[in-house]
Structures are given as C-alpha cells and as structure tokens.
Image (tube, helix red, strand yellow):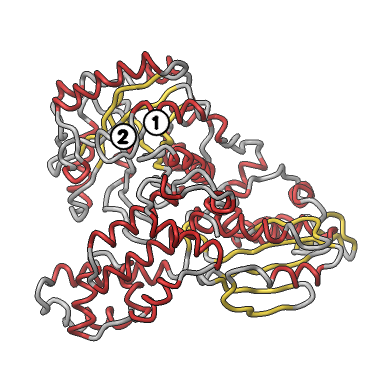
Amino acid sequence: MVNQQIAQIFYRIADLLEIKGENPFRIRAYRNAARTIESLGRNLQEMVEQGEDLTKLPGIGKDLAGKITEIIETGTLAKLQELEAQVPPGLVELLKVEGLGPKRIKILHDKLGITTLEELKNAAAHGEIHRLPGFGKKLEELIMKGVVLAKKEGRRFRWALAESYVLELLNHLGKAPGLKKAEVAGSFRRKKDTVGDLDILVTASQPHRVIEHFVRFPGVKNIISKGQTRSTLILTSDLQVDLRAVEAESYGSALHYFTGSKAHNIAIRSIAQKAGLKINEYGVFKGDKRIAGREEKDIFSAVGLPFIEPELRENRGEIEAAATAKLPQLITQKDIRGDLHMHTKWSDGKYSIEDMARAALRLGYSYIAITDHSKRMAITKGLDDEKLRQQAEEIERVREEVKGITILKGIEVDILEDGSLDLSDEALSSLDIVIAAVHSKFKLSRTQQTRRIIKALENPYVNILAHPTGRLIGEREGYQVDMEQVMNKALEKGCFLELNAQPARLDLNDVHLKLAKDMGLRVAVSTDSHNTDSLLFMRYGINQARRGWIEPKDVINTQPLDVLLRLLRR
C-alpha cells in the first residue's frame, strides 16, 4: 500500500467516526495523520520494512503507527471494517454533498431515514429537508445542487490518488514473466484532473502469464474477466482497471487509440480517411497492408503531423496547431525556478521558515515566497500588521543563515466581501509579493463575486490571485465569477493568476489556463504548501499547466529572480 491509499483509509475512518458522533479529538487525529501521510515525501511501506519509528512523524502516535503497519502488512484495517459494518455505506457518500457535514447527515438519517444520494435528492425535491431543525430552504436548495455534483462526479478519482494505484500496479506488473512494455493510457495519461478507470496496455512474450500475474494484484475486490489477452479488475477502492495485451506491431496504435480522447481520435481518423488510410487500434492501413503501428509517433507521421503530447489530445485546436507547426513547447518541472505560495508555523503551516527554505533549496529552487494567511483566517492563526512585521524580521535572519536561495516576504491576504483587503496598504507595501484570495462568501452572485475580485486586483500592492475559482475537485464547485473579466483586469493592472497545484484544487482548470494563454496573461504555478513534503505537489500543477497549453514563457516562476522582481513591480 502506498501513502495516498493509507491516507484515504484514515480519511474514511474519520468520516465514519464523525457520522457516528464520536470524540472530535479522535476524529481530528485521523484527519491530521491522513494529511501528514499524503504529503509525506517518503514511502511508508519502505519505512515499515526498514523498521523505522513511525511515531517520529508529525501527528502519528503509537496507535496510528500500529494501524499503518497493519494496513501495509495485511492490505486492510480491522478498525475500518468494524466501522463500515456499523454505518450504512451510502451515508459516507452524502459527505460529498456541499452543505452537509456528519452532524447534518446524522439528523437526515435519524429523522428521515436517508441513506443514499437518491433518497436525499427525493427528500429535497419534496421539501422535507427544510422543515428539519437547523435546516432551511436555502440549505435545501444547496443540497439539491450538491447532489447533482456528487452524482456527476460518480466514482471518479483525483489524478494524484489514481497515480498511487498506477505506481503500485506497474510495480506489480514489472514482476510478471515475459513482460516487455507496460503503460497506462486513457484519461490518466492525458493528465485529466479526475480519472474514472485505468487502461493498461502491455506487450509480452506470453500474455496469458502476464494476465495470471495481474489478477494476483493485492487489493482486488472482484475479478470481472480473465482471458488470454484481456482482464478487468475492480480494486477494493472501487477503481476499475482494464489490462490489454497487444502485439508489438500494434503497440503504438493501441496506445494512441486507448489514450484518446475520443474527439481527438475521430479527428485523426477523419484526416486519415481523406488520405485513403484507415486507423484503428491495430495500426495504420493502406488497403490491407499495415504501414504503421509499432510506435505511437508513426501514427501521427502517417497523417502528416508531428507527435502531439497526450495532455493536448482533446480536439481543442491541437491538430490544427500541429498541421501549421504551432504546437506549444510545453512546460516541464525542470523549468520551475521557485515556489511563490507556501505557509509556515506563523499561520497554519507545520514547519519553520528555515525548514521550508532548506527544503526548497534541496529541490534546486533559487527563490521562494513565504505567504502565510492574513488575520481574517482566525482558524489558521492569520497574521495582523504587527505579526507580519515580526515575521519579516525572522525572514531577514533566515536569509543570513540559508545561503543559495532568496526568500521573498509575502502574504496570502483575504479578499473581504466588499473587495477590500484584510491588511492595511502600509503593511502590504513592505512586502515583495502579495497574493490575494477568496476564502469566504462563496455564494455571492456572479456579478457581486466578479466585482469583489476586480476591486481587489485594483489594489496597487496585489500581485497574484490565488486559486481563482475556489473549487475543490469532487467536493465543491467553484464560486460564480466572470473569469474573462477578471483576466482582463489582471492584464490591465499587471497582476497574475495562480495555478494552485494542490491535488484537490488544480485551480485554474485547463480551459481557463488556455484562455489566459490566448489573452497573453501569465500565471504562477505554486504549491500552496503547508509542509515541506507538499512542495513536491508542483508536478501536479505542471500536469495541469500542460493541459492548458502552457509554455515556460507563460509562467512567472520560470523566470530568473531579477526578471520576476520586475514583473512583481506592477
């Protein structure tokens, strides 16, 4: 079991405990442990195998360390099974609905007998929910919308979680006899922010032996099919995994076909047909003769195109760009010179300024920005003007102690409902970088929210708009805002928008990123890290940036420090 999967087990336990109304400190312990685990830079399985003391990890005591070991050694956890037997399974699904927490779910279950999303939807449609104590008509309407989002999301997995299964599956397949190649195709390869299932393609000298090995993967819930060249599994997480063994001569064409998207493939086949060719998962054919198929690049060559990166294959102009030699030179993680959004112990971060600086230095960065929360975020111990001044003094000290990296003074300042900022202009003027963010009043109208953000961007000290839509993937839709209007204002005022690399955010999405690029608006790709390990989330942001056609020149933190500082002067 890898870190992400262990974290998901702990999150689920916390949800089940909350629904049961258990001790809030115990619930918080599981959530804190899950956050520690999912952002941990090291592999927990290796740590357990090497006999390391897990209690040295933040928030991991003796009991939780024992549970981690149990999961790694057995692939499951008795405590989770015990709780799942006590709580109707559909109740956990209700947690995906915006406006519903465990306490409200318990009331809905106790008073109305609701256990599924469909029952919740029906109760809301018949006006039964707003009559309950602590509920109301506005909440009932919010629940109706939330049910639609939860059902639309279905059984999709965030890309980062799907990746943890991919790594484990490929490691398992690597030990199969006769395996030659193995790669995951589909939406995972295109780096979509959520993944419905996994499609694995392999070539092997004895495909049936690879299939036999595949179905022995630990953590399988059901074996749906097992043939000589194909098999489908359902994992205990309910993730579906399809494996196909193909001939080496067809591997490239199969990889292209099963990577998709469907719209991209149709467009490529249309070009082929006009040239008298036929393209399918077995190859490129002229009449009955196969003329290409072994390598994926040959599929594109056959229709007169250069190779198109998987992240671009959505039929959103990539084929026309390829035909006119205008494909973008997509950004890579090596292009990033620094991280401009992170938190420390001064607010809700886990590590000191020095810890974050040294971790960034190890990643090869030449600069970082310390951007703790401002005072309105009381739950995060946000900074007021005086604390911001004190933090600046500490940054000066750390600058002297940590050589080889520049530490910029910054803040993540709250945008208040009227568009004003949470700190004085005098305080903001003393900083190198100011990131403005919406953390409240998500339900304002589109007009109000747009006006609010635009007013914030008009403040002469604001540089970047953080997580611009406020979405949480699969949990909360973004607030209503005219993004094009916001982007135009940012361009006018010399501001930038953030691509937040947190796996639950990936905000901006790929469509907004492409819009920003087309407008000439640069972005900052930042991790919003609250600990040193989360600095590694940068790669999720890079995935998203590539889907949005982003090149190094489109990102401000690919620039040398002197250029970055000029850009931040508005």
Q: Amino acid at mark 1?
A: Met
Mark-to-mark CA distance, 2 and 1 = 8 Å
Check disc 1 and report its element: helix, strand or loop: helix
Q: Would you identify the image quadrant in which residue 456 lies?
A: top left
Check disc 2 and report its element: helix, strand or loop: loop
Residue at image location 87% in from the left, 55% down from the top: 291
Taking the image as shown, residue 84 lies to the left or right of residue 450, namely right
Q: Residues within 10 Å of mark 2 (few under 14, many from 20)?
A: many
The reply to whether residue 277 is in sight is: no
Instruction: Give the residue number, with chain letter if any, for mark 1.
Output: 356
Q: Is residue 452 above or below residue 393?
A: below
Q: How many marks can you see? A: 2
Q: Would you identify the image quadrant in which residue 83 lies?
A: bottom left
Q: Is residue 70 above or below residue 442?
A: below
Residue at image location 56% in from the left, 64% down from the top: 73
Taking the image as shown, residue 198 lies to the left or right of residue 254, namely left
259 vs 162, nearest the viewer: 162
Q: Residues within 10 Å of mark 1 (few under 14, many from 20)?
A: many
- Position in image of residue 281 (x %, y %): 75, 64
Q: Is residue 32 above or below residue 515?
A: below
- Position in image of residue 427 (x %, y %): 17, 23
Circles 2 and 1 in contact, beta carbons < 8 Å: yes
